Amino acid sequence: MTPEPSRRTLLALATATGALATLPAFTASAAPRRPEASYDTAAHDELWWQAPADEHSMIEQGLPIGNGRLGALASNDPGRELLLVTDATMWTGGLNDTLDADGQFPYGRQDFGSFTLLARLAVDIPDHDLSAVSGYRRTLDLDRGVITTSYVRSGVTYRRQIFASRTDDVIVLHFSQSGGGRYSGTVALEGTHGEGSSVSFGAAFANGLRYGAAVTAYGAGGTVTAGGSGIAFARCKDLTVVLSGGTNYAPDAATHYRDPSLHPEKLARTKVRAAARHTADTLLRTHVADHRALFGQLDVALGTSSEEQRSLDTWERIRARARDGVPDPELEAQYLQFGRYLMIAGSRGSLPLNLQGLWLDGNDPDWMGDYHTDINLQMNYWMADRAGLSECFDAFTDYCVDQLPSWTELTRTLFNDPRNRYLNSTGKIAGWTVAISTNLHGGMGWWWHPAGNAWLCDSLWEHYEFTGRRSHLEKIYPLLKGACEFWEARLLTTTLPGTSQEVLIADSDWSPEHGPLDAKGITYAQELVRSLFGNYCAAAAELKKDTGFADTIAGLRKRLYLPQVSPTTGWLEEWMSPDNLGETTHRHLSPLVGLFPGDRIRPDGSTPAALVEGATALLTARGMESFGWANAWRSLCWARLKNADNAYQLVVNNLRPSTDGGNGTAFNLFDIYEVEQGRGIFQIDGNFGTPAAMIEMLLYSRPGHLELLPALPDAWAASGSLTGAGARGGFVVDLRWRDGKPTEARIRSIGGRTTTVAYAGTSRTVALKPGASVTLKDLDR
């Protein structure tokens, strides 16, 4: 009998066959994968710098790697390579199933819990101090998922490569040279919670979460010796360091989110030993094949930059773009691709991306690095389907499914607690909802957030619109139904002033995150519940389930109050009041969820002009200057309104270099959010929301309708292309344009059958069978 090929062989063959093996992660199953798309490596996917990171400023200067669960920031210092290592499941805290006297869930590192570091890895090479080398350069190859550092010392060129392999579930550092050089030094793995330095460690938090990590090293032409406190290497021509680690977290409420049979330190040692049986080149090749299978599914070109711009390193290009005000379309395309790189690195086979993504520089991230449900978790995934990374969305879906039993129980026992200011006036309770913050233990933090369930469901439904995957619809159906049950119990009947018309409105709530704390019928909730009810009815019809309940929900939807335009301000009302009850330039765009991510408000003639004008007036009043994630949301809304100038300017605003903790882009391209004067933090949603806005400027979609170049800015108009972009309705679009007009559009069905394709007031109807495609030309005629 012919033996079955190994997983490594399957990956090595992926570029030729388009097939990929399904491989296990540390504690969770791997996400399903699409066949690999062809992709040519190009310099435009390489970021580069002329200086290493200061190890005291790693969150702004360290370069990120990750395999979806295991991640690190790398310093790339010639004499001391430092990695700050994370695991997505490395959390303190617990279920957090109590309310305080003010009706809030506790929100601290010990009760609610916090995302925290797993380990620090340092490779010290004492005679390679930065002052003793020349020609230093480090790169982040987005296409291959590899960090490379090179420099010259004593006439010898030294090179190191760092990557996080999903195939082997390890982080790999490979040190090589050309010219007769040698490496001598030490490798030290250190826990970040008092575990000390060794070749492996294991420990546990008070919450019962066990964790551990291990490292090994091997080389050629010298000696490598492991000791109690680390590894020593001497006179090596090359050196390979392999690290792994993880926790015994299990995505199962029935086991309290723990796997008691799992021993993380032992498993980490097993993984590094298994990986060390292979050469660094083999580990690299299989990693690159796996990474490219996702990265290569989308490419974007926004125009040609000047030779002068190309000659600058990435940080100097960011500074020059802000200083000179000259568009740099290749840099802007790189920023989009950097967001995709982070998504691949941080969202596969484990937990979804939190406020920090997968990267930390310490154990105390702001807001605990949690899952905020009033914009941030959702924004992290607006890009995924649009950018050819639907597989990466599965971590979000799985998180919601896995947390649902706990969310349902906490809603049943605590939502109608008299301390909760948002309890249901009806006295009824059913289904589930969430607080503003959620953790991975099934628990909540801060205030209850009644409409949070509807927004999470809206994101889950939109993924179905992109992919058409029936298996996904079946998986999320209990979430949709439970959220509808919650709102059936919560909605209140009221009579509109001056009329006899009775409508349904949301009970007391807070329009995130400003204004009165106890307003009824807030626009945010009304829009999200309307969307939830419509999506649920469609799901029930598709799955042929719960006809009677779906009819009830459809009846409630017809009675929902729809927000109006204020005769006082001319804005779409945020509250059921003609007056502005909050901050005019507030960061959140809560009342505009019907514009984006929803699309009840459309500037295409299908929506009353007064409503579009009211939304535009409110968006204008909110301003063009805010935090990165808030600018991204603004950009998406302006793209929906087909205002290319404003949408583009907000992208540019986010590309400004962050200085002295101000809003903008850090040295390593992380989005920095100024929380107070002179203090900025990394919050990853800006890195995902901005690329989502860039794609939305080039392609708008809803089921049955595609629009090409709806908000193409002048900076990208000369020529460009977008290939592999996802479109709602079950299509993938390849688009090319010149002189501001589309020259060709290829529409491929991944399940969709009929759609209109529109540009500049003209449209064509396309009918396709799943798997088929059509290419359209002369689209402006």
Image: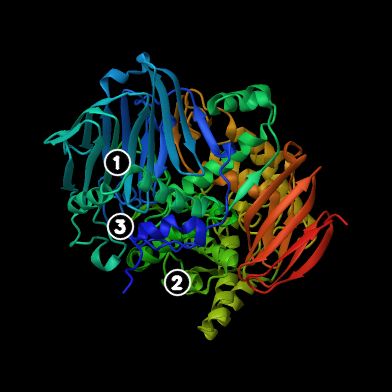
On the picture, is 83 further left or further right than 137?
left
On the picture, is 418 further left or further right than 247?
right
Residue 223 image position (x, y, % from top left): 19, 32
Residue 173 image position (x, y, % from top left): 33, 37
The residue indicated by pointer 3 is: 441
- Residue at left offset 67%, top offset 26%: 307
Q: Nearer the viewer, mark 2 or mark 3?
A: 2
| Quarter placement of the N terminus | bottom left
The tag earlier along the polypeptide, 1 or 3, is 1
Cα separation between marks 2 and 3: 20 Å
Cα separation between marks 1 and 3: 17 Å
The residue indicated by pointer 1 is: 117
Residue 758 image position (x, y, % from top left): 78, 59
Instruction: Work out whether residue 517 or residue 767 is closer to the camera in this orientation and state it.
Output: 767
The tag earlier along the polypeptide, 1 or 2, is 1
- SS class, disc 2: helix
Cα separation between marks 1 and 2: 32 Å
Instruction: Work out whether residue 439 or residue 65 is closer to the camera in this orientation and state it.
Output: 65
How packed mark 1 is, by other alpha carbons closer than 10 Å (few <14, some 14-19, many 20 or more), is many
